[in-house]
Amino acid sequence: YVKKEAWEPFFTELLNIESCDKMPDLVSLRNTLEEALGDRSSLDSKFRNFANVLNKR
């Protein structure tokens, strides 16, 4: 899975809520996911550059 270290706490916290008094910090979860998924665009760019080199463009 892509960025498993970012998704795992997300699902663990949201699927294992102890009580309504101990709700997960959604802002923190969102920030973590945004940071992890934000890096994906740079990875996509590197793959495109690599494909262009292979295709001699």
Image (cartoon, rainbow, N blue to C red):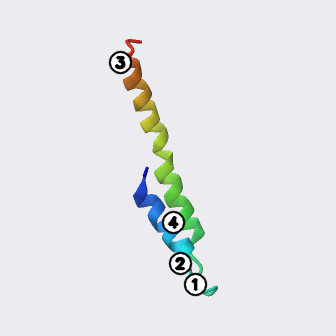
Picture coordinates of residue 22, whole percent (x, y): 57, 84
Q: Which residue is mark 4?
A: 10
Badge number at residue 16: 2
Q: Which residue is mark 1?
A: 22
Picture coordinates of residue 17, whole percent (x, y): 56, 80
Q: Amino acid at mark 2?
A: Asn
Picture coordinates of residue 37, whole percent (x, y): 50, 49
Position of 54 relative to 18 (above/below)? above
Looking at the rendered structure, the secondary structure element under dot 4 is: helix
Could you say which is closer to the camera, residue 12 or residue 21?
Answer: 12
Left or right: 27 as drawn, with respect to 50: right
CA gap, disc 1 and disc 2: 10 Å
* Disc 2 + disc 4, Cβ < 8 Å: no
CA gap, disc 3 and disc 2: 46 Å
Ranked by sequence position, the earlier of labels 2 and 4 is 4
Q: Which residue is mark 3?
A: 54
Picture coordinates of residue 44, whole percent (x, y): 46, 35
* Disc 1 + disc 2, Cβ < 8 Å: no
Looking at the rendered structure, the secondary structure element under dot 1 is: loop
CA gap, disc 3 and disc 4: 37 Å
